[in-house]
Image (tube, rainbow, N blue to C red):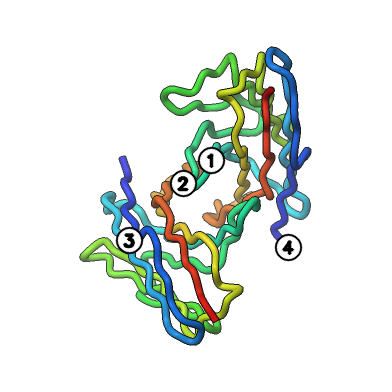
Amino acid sequence: GENVEQHPSTLSVQEGDSAVIKCTYSDSASNYFPWYKQELGKGPQLIIDIRSNVGEKKDQRIAVTLNKTAKHFSLHITETQPEDSAVYFCAALSNQAGTALIFGKGTTLSVSS
Amino acid sequence: GAVVSQHPSRVICKSGTSVKIECRSLDFQATTMFWYRQFPKQSLMLMATSNEGSKATYEQGVEKDKFLINHASLTLSTLTVTSAHPEDSSFYICSASPTTADRFHYEQYFGPGTRLTVT
């Protein structure tokens, strides 16, 4: 089955700096890779996703890159703000209807002002 | 769009009682919903996959008789924790994926979670 590794587990940056979180996956059949942001006591919020037929996707300050050959994908947050502080999870999904996401262990991002 | 609600958001119950948690997709239909459990500072652990109109598929190690799942409609799935014990205290989160008649959508949207405390 699929296994998703996520690094780093914690990340501290200064406001305005960039933050990068990396994930690797094991199942070459996986073709959908979302990123979620979870604030304390809340459910995960989908912030960006990418499919395997695309190498990069941007949404304002957030971007995700995918390297299918190496089986890794990364989340890039530019111009970080204190409100970006949260736990970020990457996930992978194989190309089967009704299958569940496999999550990484999460990265706690702290942005200090 | 793509809003998932959960009720209740918090519940405290006594050991031995049962608790029902509802998960609703408010503005889309979801043939499949998922139930997760999350311990403090840990990732989401998949408990079961709930399919409308059929029995849920449970992950290894999850007791189906203890965690009863019902997916009665395309917008509602319920998780009942039966004979709850303190070790069942956790954050329970559901997710749902929009489906259409001709295509399965990959996006999964999560509910806000339910904090269960068993005393």
Q: Nearer the viewer, residue A97 or A76?
A: A76
State whether discs 2 and 1 lie on one chain. yes
- Cβ atoms under marks 4 and 1 closer than 8 Å: no
Q: Are marks 2 and 4 on the same chain?
A: yes
User: The disc numbered 2 marks a residue on which chain?
Assistant: B
Rendered residue at 66%/14% (across/down) = B83
Residue B98 in view of the camera: no
Percent from the top left, x then y, of residue A29? Answer: 31, 51
Tell me the residue that label 1 is attached to: B38
Q: For the residues marked 2 and 4, what is the alpha-carbon distance in whole angstroms? A: 26 Å
Residue type, mark 4 in image: Gly
Tell me the number on the disc at residue B43.
2
Local crowd size for mark 2, using a 10 Å CA cut-off: few (<14), some (14–19), many (≥20): some
Label 4 near label 3: C-beta < 8 Å?
no
State the SS at label 1: strand
User: Is residue A79 something one can see in this rendering?
Assistant: yes
**Circles 3 and 4 on the same chain:** no
Subunit ID for the residue under disc 3: A
Crowd class of label 1 (few under 14; some 14 to 19; many from 20; radius 10 Å)? some
Q: Residue at x 74, y 24 (%)?
A: B13
Q: Chain of mark 1?
A: B
Question: Mark 2–mark 4 contact, CB under 8 Å?
Answer: no
Whichever of callouts 2 and 1 sits on the residue coming sooner in the sequence is 1
- Of the numbered discs 2 and 4, the one sitting upstream in the chain is 4
Say which residue appears at 58% left-offset and 76% top-offset: A82
Please give the label number shown on residue B113: none
Q: Quadrant of the N terminus of chain B?
A: bottom right
Q: Which image quadrant for residue A13?
A: bottom left
Residue shown at 57% from the left, 26% from the top: B56
Q: CA distance from mark 3 to mark 4?
A: 31 Å
The residue beneath circle 3 is A7
